[in-house]
Amino acid sequence: MKEYIKQQIKKSYETKQNIYEDEALLNNIQTVAKKCVQLYRGDKKTILAGNGGSAADAQHIAAEMVGRYGFDRPSLPSLALTTDTSALTAIGNDYGYDKVFSRQLEGMGQKGDIFIGISTSGNSLNIVEAFEVAKKKNIFTVALVGRDGGEMAKIADISLIVPSDSTPRIQESHILIGHIICDIIEKEIFADGVS
């Protein structure tokens, strides 16, 4: 069993090593972080959504912005569309599950916001539909995905594609990327920046 545990740890850091060596992905992470810094300096917000473990990641990243990531500082506006059970169940019941995020984004998203859709496959239809609403509202879209990026990578303004086919490894890497972006935002806005 200990060898199996070690294998799982090794697979996790091998995925992160692949991210470390992927210049295009690193550049895209940097671009998203810079866009988020600009957004927050312009009094706009980040909006996130995902399903299952990706819903938890959306809530986790939003909480880092609203609460704090590395040090005490003013709150930053960030919203996870996965938390309001009344809205989710009403929209799901009345319009279908594919509309649970797009309908919320239609009501709460504003031009200049950033919508981050999280999916390991990149094919979550409810995120794809939210991207379509975002485009109509001039909301910048980020696909935080894995595998080949799926449909989300085709329509997002920018894609952060974890180079893996393993759902657990993709999810572990999504939160790493989310943490890096949170860290850069916090340091750029409230500290001495990132060198």
Image (spheres, helix red, strand yellow):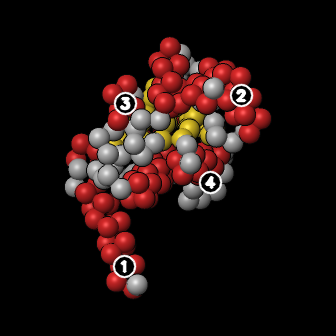
Q: Nearer the viewer, mark 3 or mark 4?
A: 3
Relative to 140, 12 lies left or right: left
- Which residue is disc 3 drawn over? 151
Give the mark nearest the N terminus, 4 or 1: 1
At 51% from the left edge and 24% from the top edge, which residue is drawn? 129
Q: CA distance from mark 3 to mark 4?
A: 32 Å
Is the Cβ of the residue at disc 1 closer than 8 Å to that at disc 3?
Answer: no
Give the mark nearest the N terminus, 1 or 2: 1
| Residue 68, numbered circle | 4
Q: Quadrant of the rendered structure where residue 142 is?
A: top left
Q: CA distance from mark 1 to mark 3?
A: 34 Å
Q: Position of residue 114 (x, y in %)?
A: 51, 30
Looking at the rendered structure, the kind of residue marked 2 is: Asn
- Which residue is disc 1 drawn over? 4
Q: CA distance from mark 1 to mark 2?
A: 43 Å
Q: Nearer the viewer, mark 2 or mark 3?
A: 2
Relative to 104, 163 lies left or right: left
